[in-house]
Each structure stands twice: as structure tokens, then as C-alpha cells.
Image (cartoon, rainbow, N blue to C red):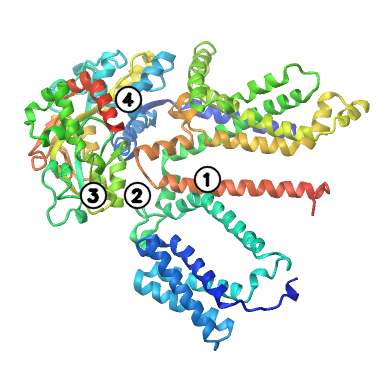
Amino acid sequence: MKYKNTVFATAALSLFAGLALAEEMTIVSWGGAYSKSQLKAYHEPYTANTGVTIINDESAGTAVPKLRAMKEAGNLTWDVVDVEAGPAMQLCDEGLAMEIDHDFMLADAPDGTLASVDFGDFIVSECFIPQIVYSYTVGYRNDMVGSTPPTSICAIFDTETYPGKRSLKKGALSNMEWALLCDGVAKADIYPTLETAAGQDQALAKLDTIKDDVIWWSAGADTPQLLADGEVVMGSTFNGRLFALIEEQNQPVSMLWDGQIYDLDGWIIPTGLSPERQARALHYVRFATDTQRLADQSRWISYGPTRASSALLVDKHAELGIDMAPHMPTDPANSKNTFLMNYAFWADYKDDIESKFQAWLAQ
Amino acid sequence: MAIFHQVLRRPVSFVLPMMGLMGGFVGVFFGPTFGSALVGLTLVSTVSVFLAYLIISTQYLSQKVIRLILPVPLAILGLIFLGPISGFFGALYGWFFGWFFYWIYEGGYRAKLHPYLTAGQVLWHYSFRVICGLIFTFLITPILVVMPLSFNAQDFFTFTPEMLRLDPVGYSLKHYQDFFNNGDWQRSFWNSLIIAPFATIISVSLGTLAAIGLSQSHVPAKRAIMAILISPMIVPLIISAMGMFFFYSTMGNFMENTLGLDKNLVGYVKVILAHAVLGIPFVIITVTATLVGFDKSLTRAAANMGAGPVKTFFKVQMPLIMPGVISGGLFAFITSFDEVVVVMFIGSASQKTLPWQMFIGLREQISPTILAVATILVGISVLLLMTLELLRRRSERLRGLSPA
């Protein structure tokens, strides 16, 4: 009995000791195919080079409230966080994300171009380290749209030509823009219109016309599942999810690139890390956002790299072997009618419009 | 009784409505296949009545032959009009129809009952069983339906046309492969296997001690203490989780900064302690329940013979309350193994447990790997419970307590 206890105790202790030995860092991201692309392009080579184990925490969807709670409790468990441009600005304003000196902290392009020039306008906040350009796009079932597949984003509001359910994001972002666009507002006037209460009501009134036909999604995986089931005739989601659905899963679905809304995704480093953790986070970010690494990610998922120097290196898909360039949201053929999300607008108006939208949703 | 039961053919006026009822019942269930429940109801009940009438009026073939032949036409009907799966169900229905028809027609339904029961009592006897069966189906179907889906060849929660045709192309083991090869799933699986047993050991030891203490007659304010100890079970989990987050953050910071313990070790300790707190009420309740039947004079007898309290506890009391301790431990284990809210608040990603990973998987990527894991877990739980039950029976038999 004594002997047995000793063995158990030793086993338990060594288990803990083994867990304690490895050097680890926690990286927060979105999960799914997106996390896989980061794993293949960034984490695996980084671990191979440095021996640091990377733990993937897929909590990026709740990054802002969780970082607030962590700061309040003084218990910061995250090292690097993947967020969209809007939340990055918000975290920066609240002092939850550290300011980055892009030229000093990030790698230059291979030809010596400074990082700030290479990223260009994608550096939307001094805390934000750009990673990818993605877009909100719509996919539709080939077998449910009849002989006239949709060519315009306004097909989502056209329930006569395309009867059936459509899935839209359970949030104001993307829906408000599309509603105004299809209500005849000129592209340049959309954000100025949304600033006014009348403009917000106009967008909601347009959405009202299809409210009964909408399934609202909250996770990026919802629309692909609904499309695969044939539960919806069309649905909005991130373009990479639709790429996976069409090219990897071979579902009878097509992309509607018209009216796609560009958004950015990138890293932030939380404030309040111990010096050695912060140094490691910076070391990781410098590695993960260099020209080659950003181009590598596009071999796994159809999101465009944010470095001008990486765009030239976009290659074939690592497993399917198809050319990735035509699947990028930034490809000329796909970007005939697009618009860039106005992050500054959303950083200022998100709370207001979002609560208005949710109230409308609950009616 | 069965031996004396006479084959008494029931009148057509009784048999035909019964067959119609049964057909309608089946038809409603398989209604969606026919287009709507109403169509299914009329269609299947009409076919059933017609078939029953045919069998009764043409008395050429023996029961055996009819019951053998019946599945064939129904299978063909299903096959032609609705497809291969319906053909299979048609055959199944044919088999069931044959059995049910003779059961009604020849009065088989009364064979095993007391002969003096009234028609109403016989009806209730069987309705009761049907109701129980329906409740059972209602409880078990959600668990069973995920099992075939976990073998889906596609990455969606959908029964594909290939799967419905029972085509091997529609099935694959890739989601099981993913579970065993994917680092995230493996890490969370091992985390669960580390956290749950330690939490169980702590809650079983503390819970048993508390239950024994509370069973002593001289303890003051027993009810109040009991209520406090059980409160983690009553307070909504999200509220305890919120409180625990701040409490354990402070504790964790103290352990890391002042005691200089490793960050990861502290993470595990925090989650294990939190889960132990959640498990303790279950142990207290089950052990208290077994202590009710415990004869206190045994401890006095042990003391009389010179055994100290500790020896008495391990040699006399413990073996007798063991069933309560074990089932309490089982509950504590399952609580920790299933827990997702508290661990998401307290744990960092290195302590990601299986339910956490499943939750993320559902939110971010609807992957049937979750279903594969669910199937594996259901399998493990069934095995675990069966082993426990077998062990319990064995010990009862050894102690001569078995009722049978």
C-alpha cells in the first residue's frame, strides 16, 4: 500500500513537473480553418526555431471583455491576441493594448522597405500589427437560385427573385452598410448617412423588409453549415469560410464578390505583461509578420496578406494545389465593387448602432 | 398462465380498427418521408387495414408463411415509391405488422396477463408501456442521433444523401483521426484526465469528512453548515464562476509571485480546487444518505474493543458507506469532466479541458470532430457505469446481500 502511494505521488508530481518545464506562450485567435492557417504558417515554424510551445486559445470573439476582466483581476494569461481592426482601436484607446513602433519592432521587407511603408494604410492604430485583409461576402446555393444566379449584393433584399431564407450576421456591422447601399445611398455617403439617426432608421427599415426571411448567425461557421444543409439560399460570412466550403468541401455554393466589405485582422500585445513575456511576444510577432510568413498563410486560407511585399509571393494552396490569387478578396476580378470598412466610424458609433440594431432585432 | 391460454380469434370489428390505429401511429412517425404527417397517417393506416382484412378474409396460408412473406410487398412498395431506405423500413414494418396482427387477432395480448382483467385495465397495461417507451425514446434519441453523424465524410452536421443511401462513400473515420492527431484535442483530453481525478479525490475526501461530521449528534447549527456546503450546487454556475475568477486570480497571483510557483502548476491547482468545490455537495449528499442507514453502535463496539477513531473509520465505517462514497465520487468526477463555465473563467488556455474545446469547436467551427468526441465519451461513460455496477453486484454477492 505504502509503495503504491509513493508511486502515485511520484507520477503525479512528475506529471506536473513535466508540464511546468516547457516554455509556453498563449496566443488568442479565432479557431477553425483560420487558426489552422496560423498554426501552419506561424506557430509550427516558430516552435521549430525557438522551442517555445504555443497554446492556441480560441477566444478572440470575446477578446475585449476578457482583457478588461483580466486587467481588473490582475491575472493576464494571454501573450498575443488576434483581433479585428475595430476592437484593436478600442483596446488601444482603453490602454489595454501596447503601442507598437512598427519600423523598430517589425521586420523590414526583403528589399529593405520599412515595415510602416510595407503595411502602408493598413496600420490603422498605433497598437495594431496588421496581418490579413478579409472581407464580408455572400455565398449562394447554385441549386436554389434558379437560372439567374445573383450578380449584385442587393440580391439579399430581393426575396421575389430569390425566395428562401438568408443568413446574415447577428450584428450591425456589414448589414447596415449593405442595407443603405441597396436602398440607393451612394457608396461614399454610406458612413455619413449612418452617423445620423435618420440614416440608421433608414437602414433598419430596409432590413425590416427581409426580417422574416433571415437566420441570424453569430459564429463564422454558421453560414457554411446552413448553406451545406440547404437551409438558406444565400448567406454572408467571411470569404475564407466560403472558400473552404466551396474548394475544400466541394459544396454546390458560389461566391458573390459584389459589394464585399473589407476588414482587417491583426495582432495586438496586451499591456501589463512581464518584461520577459513581452519580449517573447514581440519576438513572435516580428517573426510571424515578416514578408514570407504572411505570404505563407495565404497558402492555407484565402485571406490577403497586408504587406505589399507579401502580395507578390502569394502561391498555390498547400493541400489543394490551386492558385490562391483568384480567391483573394483583393484580386482585381473580385474587387470590382467593394468598400473598405470605416474602422474609425465603427470605433466611435459601434456601441450606439449595435444596441439600436439589437433592439430592432428583439422587436 | 400462458400454457392455459386459448387461441381465441378476435372479431374483425375489433381487429381492423386496432390495425388502423397502429398504422396511423407508425404513419405519423414516418410522416416526413411521405411528405406530411397527415399523408403518412392516412396512407399507412389504410394499407394496414386493407392488409389485415385481406389476411382475415383469405384463410389460405398459415401464420408462419404470412409473417415470412409480409415484409416483401411492403419493402417493394417503399422501394418503388420512396427509395432504398424506405424499402428497408417497409420490410421492418412488414415484420412488425405480421407480429402485431397475430398478437391482436389471436388474443396474444392477453396471454401473459391475469385473465380477470377488464378491457380497460388491459388497455392501460399496454398504454403505460407505450408511454414509458416514448419517454425513453425522447431521452435517448438526441444522444443516439449524433453517433452516425460522427462518421460523416463531410465537415458538417448534416446527413448527406450518401449517408442516407448507406453508401460507404458517405462515411469515414476522419473525425476520429482528427481527434487523435489534433494537438488541441489531445491536450484538452489529457487536461480533463488530469483535472477530473484530482478534483474528485479532493472532493471525496473533504465531502466524506464533512458528511460524517454533520452526522454526529453534537455538532451545532448542522442545517446552516449543510446549506453553506451545498450552496455551490444551488447558486447559478455563472455567478460562482465570476466570484471564483476574482478569488482565484488573487490566490494565483500570490502563489506565483510570493511562493514562486510555476504559472502552469498554479493554473492547474486553481482549476482543480474550483472543480473540487463544485463536486463536494454531491459527495456530501450521497454519503449523508448512506450514513442514515449506518448503525452507530458499530463504532462504539469498535471503540470498546480498543480501536482508535481513525482505525474505526477505515476498518468499520468506511467499508459500510463505500457505495455512497463511490457514487458521490462518480458525480464529482462527472461534474469536473463536464464543466465548462468555471474552467473558462479560471483556467488559461493551457488548462483547456475537453468541454471547453468542444464549446469552442461548436462556436467557431461546426466540426463533426465534436460528435466523434461525444461518441467516444458516451462509450467511456457507458463502460465506466457498467464496470461500477458489476463491481457493486459482485461485492453484494460476496457479502451475501444480493436480493435475488
Q: Which residue is mark 2?
A: B155
Do we see residue B186 in this rendering? yes
When asked about the image quadrant of residue A34, the answer is top left
Q: Position of residue B281 (x, y in %)?
A: 64, 28
In the rendered image, residue A86, in percent from the top left (x then y), is placed at 23, 23
- Work out whether residue B98 or residue B207 is closer to the camera in this orientation and state it: B98
Dot label at residue A164: 3
What residue does disc 1 label?
B377
Disc 4 marks which residue?
Answer: A81
Mark 2 belongs to which amino acid?
Asp
Disc ID at residue A272: none
User: In 3D space, how far apart are the residues under numbered discs 1 and 3 (Cα atoms)?
Assistant: 38 Å
Within-10-Å neighbours for mark 4: few <14, some 14–19, many 20+: many
Q: CA distance from mark 2 to mark 3?
A: 24 Å
Q: Callout 4, which amino acid?
A: Val
Q: Please, what is the three-letter code of the amino acid marked with disc 3? A: Gly
Quarter of the N terminus of chain A within the rendering:
top right
Image quadrant where one finds the C terminus of chain A: top left
**What's the CA distance linking mark 4 and mark 2?**
27 Å
The residues bearing labels 1 and 2 have C-alpha atoms spaced at a distance of 20 Å
